[in-house]
Image: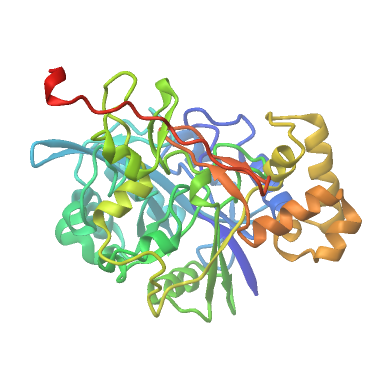
Amino acid sequence: MKVVATFHFHSKYARATSKNMDLDGISAGMKVKGLDLAGTGDFTFPAWFEELKKLEEIDNTGIFRYNDAHFMLTGEVSTTFEHENKIRRVHHVIQAPSLEIVGQINEALSKFGNLSSDGRPMLSMTAAELVEVLMEISSDIVITSAHIWTPFFSVFGSKSGFNSVEECYQDQTKHIFSLETGLSSTPDMNWRLSSLDKFTLVSSCDSHSQNPWRLGREANVFELKKLTYNEIWDAVRKKDKSKFLYTIEVPPEYGKYHYTGHRNCGISLHPKEAMKVNNVCPKCRRGLTIGVMQRVDELADRPEGYVPKDAIPFKSLLPLYEIISFVTKVNKLYSKKTLDEQNRLIDRFGTELNVLLDASEEELREATKEEIAEAVIKVRGCKIQFEPGYDGVYGTPIFDENYVRKEIVLPKQKSLKEF
């Protein structure tokens, strides 16, 4: 059976999330998107954990059901700790096979932070301590390092991260086998680091909304004989290409931290431009937020285009709503015109992923305006440009083939005579 799965997102109990991110809203959103399996998110939050007890486990498989949607028990936590005189903040996604084990996780982690403070609690413990505590509960728990390049809260983050997975997880690295690419990186960027070859790259949406332009925008596609917790993580651990077919990724330029920049000053720079100004904002003279593209360049030991022999393939997509919005130049959230067209196409092809992945060119041209059909086809073929995202600002897709990005005019360096 084919299984499209996303493991990491948040419930209504996390900060800045939709009130519809409950079991009814998430299960309904999964059907619209075309997701076969989703994480529950936020299982450490007491009220949400109580709601998760409504889930029906399917034959002791570690897979749960609600409204004909399938779930896996997941949660994200943030660890804050000092290492080598620097405060480190790293996020981790925890996957568990049973409610009983989740209860034990929550009891153990409550000693390191207030689990009622947020759907993604802040824990005063090192990344290695987190893994050690979880492994003492059950070796079936899976810990995935979350959005590994995000500047502020990740293993490689330019603001508080490390230069290797081993630096972060220390002697507990042996229990880490999966890393999450995040919105601002794709597998091919990660393939440039030989040190990551031992890990499997997974992709999840980190959504705060049940809408299809957020929920499942990044996902993993499996071909399994039976849908079970162990089958999925065994396929991931072994990089079994017969079972783990590919990941779905948004283009990295779409993510909020691809380029280096400073949001308050509207400065967005390619790594080469950023280095010319010593990573200092040319307007306000404060430090720039180093983007993922630049951070990958700093740590890479391979050229662009390198593909490891056991790498899991990926497909690059944009949410349908955003394709319609930008190609028709109705660039605002919750445009009724855009929503109507999105929903009409989803009704026609069954799910959003069917529109984006499976509908033929002929079917698309029959079903919608020529410009929208052409845009979907261009996205599939990675034939669009971007104003890349930076410092918390999403990237902007450009469908005009004649578009040329305006380069930032940097101030000239002062000569010695001017000082």
Measured as percent of width and height from the top left, residue 410 is found at 35, 29
- Compared to residue 225, the image places residue 15 above or below, namely above
Q: Quadrant of residue 334?
A: top right
Residue 69 in the image: above or below residue 303: above
On the image, which quarter does residue 366 sit in?
A: bottom right
Q: Quadrant of the N terminus?
A: bottom right
Where is residue 285? Give x, y as percent: 27, 21
Q: Position of residue 96 (x, y in %)?
A: 42, 57
Q: Is residue 187 visible?
A: yes
Applied colour scheme: rainbow
In this orientation, does residue 92 appear?
no
In the image, farthest residue toward the left: 84
> Looking at the image, which residue is at 30% across and 48% down?
295
Report the residue at 39% width, 77% height from top: 238
Q: Nearer the viewer, residue 204 or 268?
A: 268
- Residue drawn at the location 33% of the way across and 66% of the way down: 303
Determine the residue located farthest toward the right in the rendered image. Answer: 366
Residue furthest out toward the front:
417
Identify the residue at horizontal 53%, vertical 38% (top origin): 11
Please give left or right for residue 328 compared with residue 365 in the image.
left
In the picture shown, does residue 404 fall above or below 306?
above
Q: Quadrant of the C terminus?
A: top left
- Side (left or right) of 83 relative to 271: left
Residue 290 position, x and y percent, is 31, 39
